[in-house]
Image: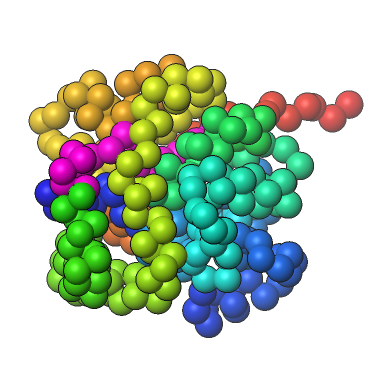
């Protein structure tokens, strides 16, 4: 149950200091800020999380990339439309990509943020030259009965259930408490609107249409040691993607960007380099 819940889920003063030289994003935009120069990499956090958790990876990538950090709808200043749906989140992401880059980007999403990123790659493939999904399931990991039980738990005891779920995401109890504290900053109505989307969305058939390279970055609890990639990709909904590669990063939990930022930045940089447009020689 903990393994399945971990897949379902996922800026302070320091962020403001890093981003103070970046252009001010338009009102109601998902864009938090940007850093670096070079090909554009866009980072999307998960449910109940924030862009701050991407900073270690962003700083690494910004040495040779233009890195853009986004907020999911209902998080931070990014508005949540009513009624809410995955389609609405996808349109918000599409607008943000249009604002930030004239050409296709390397789009990176964590957990539920990866689900939105995959939806955007299906909706507007011309905007995405490579897709990196970090601890993202493209098919539901809970049965209908398990989903109903979990939603009932949230409705009966919101704070207790939120704590139980997010504390289980941490690599240790201290990180779990910190993740729970971050999740409490998201308004309850926004989180409750996201939960059915996170638990019921199934893109495992639709992703057969993806033509760009896809890298699935997984922690050991999602792709267990000794488990084949074929088995893991089937369980997580990747098996129909034509150009997909799985990479397991060791010694980390659900929040790979916090536990192994250097390894994750290396993986993103690798797929970015593999899909970069050739540079024309000067005459």
Image coordinates of residue 134 in percent, x first then y, are 37, 45
Give the residue furthest to the bottom: 13
Residue 141: quadrant of the picture:
top left
Image coordinates of residue 203 in percent, x first then y, are 40, 31
Above or below for 98 versus 26 = above
User: Which residue is nearer to you in this view: 44 or 162?
Assistant: 162
Tell me: 226 left or right of 42. Answer: left
Image coordinates of residue 39 in percent, x first then y, are 65, 43
Residue 63 visible, this orientation: no
Above or below for 172 versus 67 = below
Dividing the image into 4 quarters, which one contains the C terminus? top right
Q: Residue at x 15, y 37 (%)?
A: 224
Tell me: 58 left or right of 223. Answer: right
Image label count: 0
User: Which residue is nearer to you in this view: 138 or 211?
Assistant: 138
Image coordinates of residue 278 in percent, x first then y, are 69, 26
Reply yes or no: does residue 135 show up in magenta: yes
Q: Residue at x 40, y 56 (%)?
A: 194
The stretch of residues the image draws in magenta is 130-147
Tell me: 25 left or right of 282. Answer: left
Q: Residue at x 44, y 65 (%)?
A: 190
Residue 231: quadrant of the picture:
top left
Q: Residue at x 38, y 71 (%)?
A: 188
Reply yes or no: does residue 233 show up in magenta: no
């Amino acid at each position: 149950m903990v393994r399945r819940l971990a897949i379902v889920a996922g800026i302070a003063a320091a962020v403001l200091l890093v981003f103070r030289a970046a252009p001010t994003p338009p009102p109601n935009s998902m864009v938090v800020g940007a850093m670096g120069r070079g090909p554009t990499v866009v980072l999307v956090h998960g449910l109940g999380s924030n862009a701050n958790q991407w900073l270690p990876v962003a700083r690494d990538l910004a040495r040779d990339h233009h890195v853009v950090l986004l907020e999911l709808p209902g998080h931070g200043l990014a508005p949540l439309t009513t009624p809410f749906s995955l389609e609405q989140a996808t349109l918000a992401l599409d607008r943000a990509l249009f604002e930030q880059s004239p050409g296709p980007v390397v789009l990176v999403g964590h957990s539920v943020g990866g689900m939105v990123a995959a939806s955007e790659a299906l909706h507007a493939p011309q905007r995405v030259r490579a897709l990196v999904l970090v601890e993202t399931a493209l098919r539901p990991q809970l049965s209908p009965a398990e989903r109903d039980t979990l939603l009932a738990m949230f409705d009966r005891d919101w704070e207790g259930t939120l704590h139980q779920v997010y504390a289980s995401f941490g690599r240790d109890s201290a990180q779990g408490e910190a993740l729970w504290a971050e999740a409490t900053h998201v308004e309850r109505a926004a989180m409750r609107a996201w939960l059915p989307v996170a638990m019921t969305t199934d893109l495992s058939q639709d992703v057969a249409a993806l033509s760009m390279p896809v890298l699935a970055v997984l922690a050991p609890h999602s792709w267990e040691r000794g488990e084949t990639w074929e088995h893991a990709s089937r369980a997580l909904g990747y098996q129909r993607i034509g150009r997909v590669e799985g990479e397991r990063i060791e010694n980390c939990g659900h929040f790979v960007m916090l536990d192994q930022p250097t390894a994750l930045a290396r993986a993103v940089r690798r797929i970015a380099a593999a899909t970069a447009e050739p540079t024309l020689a000067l005459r």
